[in-house]
Image (spheres, grey):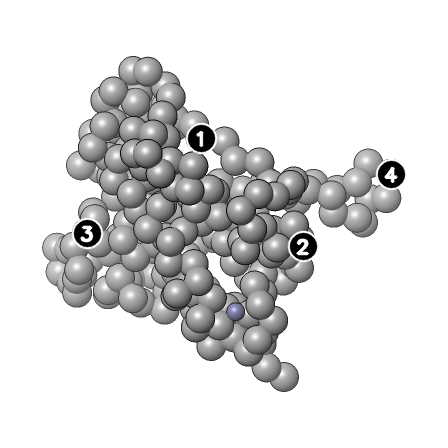
Amino acid sequence: MSITCWICGKESNSREHIIKKSNIIRVYGKGPYKGENALIHVKNGNMKVVQGPDSKKVKYEFSLCHECNTTFTQPFDIAYDNFISFIYENEQEILRKRFVNFSDVYGEDFEEGQRNLYKYFAKSFGCRLYDAGSSVPQDICSLLKKKSFITGLRINFSVNEDILILPNKIRDGFIGKGDLLVWLDKTVKTEINGYTWNEHVS
Ligand SMILES: [Zn+2]
């Protein structure tokens, strides 16, 4: 049985990074990560050595087709990279003000930039659900191709104060994704009616 791309339904032949390659390279360089530069990925309490930013250990199993994971979603990845770069470069000011103005991040095209950033998180979440064996909600699949949409996906940004007190040198290397939590229906206890998930950078 072939595995299908959760975005378009074609045969899946591409792996999405769990930890975004650009985030790994920003902090750890292009690798290989050896000796003093050895990199450890911790998943469900298990530690694995990662030798480079393209290691299979930081990728999901096949869940997308090549087209969906490259050309189609590239603008989303770029919007995310620009956002994270902006956060790194303006960290002190953001921490003081506690808001991000997307026109500062994306300039005049902020409408498209913030929509593409939203779609990056939708893709990231879809890959996580698919990896967990859950179907990806239809509104998440379909919004990726739309300019305006209605969806149940809500995205919040927050500052993790417990991590913030660590020196940059240590916390900049904390890049990862949290546990996927499932919310069950109050009456039909076997029915899933929501998920909560997070990803963190520094
Ligand atoms: Zn596809």
Q: Quadrant of the N terminus?
A: bottom right
Could you tell me residue 137's position as x and y percent?
Answer: 66, 53
User: For the image shown, how many numbered marks are present on the structure?
Assistant: 4
Query: Do residues under tags 3 and 2 come within 8 Å of each other at their CB atoms?
Result: no
Residues packed near mark 3 inside 10 Å, few (<14), some (14 to 19) or many (20 plus): some
Residue at horizontal 32%, vertical 16%?
A: 97
Q: Spatial distance from mark 1 to mark 4, Cα to Cα?
A: 31 Å
Residue at horizontal 32%, vertical 34%?
A: 108
Which quarter of the figure has residue 102? top left
Residue at horizontal 39%, vertical 65%?
A: 71
* Residue placed most toward the observer, 38 or 12: 12
* Residue placed most toward the observer, 180 or 76: 76
Could you tell me residue 2's position as x and y percent?
Answer: 59, 82
- Looking at marks 1 and 4 on the same chain, the residue that comes earlier in the sequence is marked by 1
Say what secondary structure mark 1 lies in: loop
Q: Amino acid at mark 3?
A: Tyr
Say what secondary structure mark 2 lies in: helix
Instruction: Please indicate, yes or no, whether residue 46 appears anywhere in the rendered image.
Output: no
- Looking at marks 4 and 2 on the same chain, the residue that comes earlier in the sequence is marked by 2
Q: Which residue is mark 2?
A: 138
- Looking at marks 3 and 1 on the same chain, the residue that comes earlier in the sequence is marked by 3
Q: Spatial distance from mark 4 to mark 2, Cα to Cα?
A: 23 Å
Q: Amino acid at mark 1?
A: Phe
Camera-nearest label, 3 or 2:
2
Q: Which residue is mark 4?
A: 187
Q: Which residue is mark 1?
A: 157
